[in-house]
Image: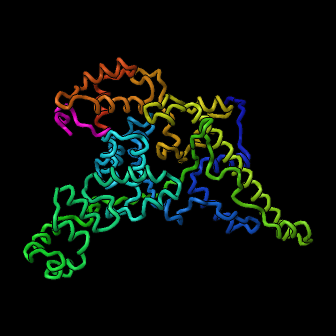
């Protein structure tokens, strides 16, 4: 029998609490604090402590689905690229097609500015199950996510996508969009815009007299309208894993650089009830003193842990923005290799602390809303990645978008061009990236508009 002496570091209750709260998502933390306020009488939540709560109908529109790595094309962390293919298929439209997946893939194939693409993705996430955009873009703009002109440009893009009619605010607009795609004009367009209700009641003679056309023409229009789809999103599968984007960090560009702010900032989520504080100092009842002392200790410890969580999150977000400065100006093409260990070293904290800080946290900027884990990728020392995988994919897409569609580039040619530009990818990796971005092969891209 051998005796072995070891040094074992044990976390105290305060450290465990700080670690637990740090890795909580925004939704989890708000739920935790709400439960705390119900069980601890000395805790009084500040008014509006959860400004991005699910009760906010505007932000409720921004759905967060599991496959939202497609929202900005490269959400999946590089470390997960070789995960179970069935798991990847479930988030890439392989096993279950949803309207959002279908729209995001179309948006990714378009040559849009980062702002317009972000707006189109955002609006796609705001659609209801029928494919309608029920909330006016003016209201969405007031929520402060994106500016109104940008949202209007995104709406034009969204309404040009398949299925025809998607992004409409009303049934009339939905059918009009479909007629535009079919190249239909004349009486049918006027009926759709003005006489849908009489048409549904079969008041054909009334419509004919009002429009000055024959009864037969009205009936012809009615038969054409019956072929349109009043629910363009109805043919797609629903998704049970629906949530709401609640950005923890907001990055805005100002004259002297980028401003990084956490969602809650310096404002504490709750304060200690003054009545119970006074009762604690005046009561002689030992049971009351014991009970209130315990509740005060609990509330104070949690308040300190929340404050430290906000501080750590702020520091990590600032360090990410400092390292990924090019991304916030150029988009995915400017994303640089970055490890959590790099952030940890620069901040003088443990790598596990960085991992907990970015877990299920989201960052909102002019390019869109991204998981904070998105900004970490494998080192450029890897033989197949000079720069991050996101940057390589972005450049690959640019080369394909710029190619002559009558003579599309082969994967081997793309491989050579990528290598010359500092992205030493193998032909097989080029093919893999192309397939992940839903880009057809050479034959499929020939003469493709």
> Which image quadrant: the N terminus?
top right
> Which image quadrant: the C terminus?
top left
Q: Main secondary structure of the magenta part?
A: loop
Does residue 441 belong to the magenta stretch? yes
Of residues 208 and 307, the one nearer the viewer is 208
- The residue at the point 48 percent across, 51 percent down is 147
Residue 105 seen in the figure: yes
In-image side of 414 versus 218 (left or right): right
- The residue at the point 61 percent across, 42 percent down is 260
Residue 125 location, x and y as percent?
A: 40, 55
- The magenta segment is 437-449
Say if 14 sits above or below 316 in the image: below
Residue 96 location, x and y as percent?
A: 30, 53
**Circle count:** 0
Does residue 282 belong to the magenta stretch? no
Residue furthest toward the top? 420
Say if 212 sits above or below 330 in the image: below
Residue 93 location, x and y as percent?
A: 30, 48
How is colour applied across the structure in the image?
rainbow
């Amino acid at each position: 029998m051998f005796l072995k002496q070891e040094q074992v570091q044990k976390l105290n209750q305060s450290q465990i609490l700080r670690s637990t709260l740090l890795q909580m998502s925004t939704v989890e933390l708000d739920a935790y604090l709400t439960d705390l306020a119900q069980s601890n009488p000395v805790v009084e939540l500040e008014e509006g402590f959860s400004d991005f709560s699910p009760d906010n109908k505007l932000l409720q529109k921004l759905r967060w689905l599991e496959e939202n790595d497609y929202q900005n094309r490269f959400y999946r962390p590089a470390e997960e690229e070789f995960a179970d293919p069935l798991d990847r298929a479930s988030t890439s439209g392989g096993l279950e097609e949803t309207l959002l997946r279908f729209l995001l893939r179309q948006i990714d194939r378009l040559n849009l500015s980062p702002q317009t693409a972000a707006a189109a993705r955002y609006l796609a996430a705001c659609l209801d199950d029928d494919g309608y955009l029920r909330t006016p873009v003016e209201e969405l703009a007031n929520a402060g996510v994106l500016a109104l002109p940008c949202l209007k440009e995104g709406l034009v893009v969204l309404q040009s996508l398949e299925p025809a009619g998607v992004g409409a605010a009303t049934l009339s607009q939905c059918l009009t969009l479909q007629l535009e795609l079919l190249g239909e004009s004349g009486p049918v367009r006027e009926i759709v815009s003005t006489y849908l209700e009489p048409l549904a009641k079969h008041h054909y003679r009334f419509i004919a007299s009002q429009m000055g056309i024959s009864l037969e023409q009205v009936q012809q229009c009615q038969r054409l309208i019956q072929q349109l789809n009043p629910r363009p999103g109805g043919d797609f599968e629903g998704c049970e894993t629906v949530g709401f984007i609640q950005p923890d960090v907001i990055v805005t560009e100002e004259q002297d650089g980028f401003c990084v702010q956490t969602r809650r900032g310096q404002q504490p989520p709750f304060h200690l009830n003054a009545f119970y504080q006074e009762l604690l100092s005046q009561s002689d009842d030992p049971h009351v003193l014991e009970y209130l002392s315990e509740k005060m200790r609990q509330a104070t410890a949690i308040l300190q842990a929340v404050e430290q969580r906000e501080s750590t999150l702020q520091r990590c977000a600032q360090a990410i923005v400092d390292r990924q400065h090019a991304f916030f100006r150029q988009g995915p093409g400017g994303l640089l290799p970055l490890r959590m260990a790099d952030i940890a070293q620069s901040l003088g904290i443990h790598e596990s602390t960085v991992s907990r800080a970015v877990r299920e946290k989201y960052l909102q900027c002019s390019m869109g809303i991204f998981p904070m884990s998105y900004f970490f990728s494998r080192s450029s020392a890897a033989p197949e990645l000079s720069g991050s995988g996101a940057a390589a994919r972005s450049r690959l897409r640019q080369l394909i978008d710029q190619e002559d569609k009558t003579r599309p580039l082969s994967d081997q040619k793309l491989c050579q061009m990528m290598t010359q530009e500092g992205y030493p990818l193998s032909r097989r990796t080029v093919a893999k990236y192309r397939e992940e971005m839903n880009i057809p092969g050479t034959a499929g891209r020939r003469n493709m508009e």
